[in-house]
Image (tube, helix red, strand yellow):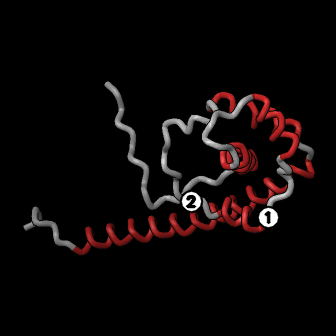
């Protein structure tokens, strides 16, 4: 017999993103956002990887990355690059980044972790108060079995 998994609470805060998550989002946007509708070739990957300037995020880009709390609309295929190739490219580039360049994404990750902890604390307070209200209501209603 299989166990039924609990449904995720829609009010629960979204998990925090790591520095690699932010780097991946940035690189994906760089690769896919600036390409025409044709496919991205492996030559384009090597050109983009040398000219990406990932350590130079503007304030607008930083705010945009931190404000992405909603899921983006799922697109089956954008037709530009296969996911396998994209992940291989991003992972390879992440390994070659200097600590200086990673600091930008580490800072974003720290800010997102702080956001998550704050939202989690608020959520837990809300859940505890809801549970207390429910318990109080049960105690307040008289038991019909007792006569």
Q: Is residue 79 left or right of residue 100?
A: left
Residue occupying image coordinates x 58% and y 66%: 119
Mark 1 burial class by Cα count in 10 Å: few <14, some 14-19, many 20+: few
In the rendered image, is residue 18 in sight? no
In the rendered image, is residue 115 in sight? yes
| Residue 122, image x, y percentages | 54, 69
Quarter occupied by residue 134: bottom left
Q: Nearer the viewer, residue 74 or 47?
A: 47
Residue occupying image coordinates x 31% and y 24%: 1
Rendered view: 129 above or below 26 = below
What is the residue that sits farthest to the bottom in this orientation? 140
Residue occupying image coordinates x 17% and y 71%: 142
Mark 2 burial class by Cα count in 10 Å: few <14, some 14-19, many 20+: few
| Residue 73, image x, y percentages | 49, 50
| Residue 132, image x, y percentages | 39, 69
* CA separation in Å, label 2 and label 1: 19 Å
| Residue 90, image x, y percentages | 75, 37
| Mark 1 secondary-structure assignment | loop
| Mark 2 secondary-structure assignment | loop
Q: Quadrant of the C terminus?
A: bottom left
How many discs mark residues in the rendered view?
2
Which residue matches tag 2? 69
Which residue matches tag 1? 58
Q: Nearer the viewer, residue 134 or 122?
A: 122
Q: Nearer the viewer, residue 123 or 115?
A: 115
Rendered view: 140 above or below 112 = below
Residue occupying image coordinates x 69% and y 34%: 40
């Amino acid at each position: 017999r299989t166990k039924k998994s609990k449904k995720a609470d829609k009010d629960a805060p979204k998990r925090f993103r790591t520095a690699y998550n932010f780097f991946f989002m940035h690189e994906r946007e760089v690769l896919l956002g600036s390409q025409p509708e044709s496919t991205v070739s492996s030559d384009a990957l090597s050109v983009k990887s040398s000219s990406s300037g990932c350590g130079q995020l503007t304030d607008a880009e930083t705010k945009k990355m931190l404000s992405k709390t909603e899921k983006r609309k799922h697109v089956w295929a954008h037709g530009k690059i296969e996911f396998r190739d994209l992940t291989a490219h991003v992972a390879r580039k992440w390994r070659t980044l200097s600590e200086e360049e990673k600091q930008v994404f580490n800072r974003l990750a720290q800010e997102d972790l702080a956001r998550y902890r704050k939202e989690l604390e608020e959520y837990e307070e809300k859940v505890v108060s809801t549970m207390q209200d429910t318990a109080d209501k049960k105690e307040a209603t008289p038991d019909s079995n007792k006569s």
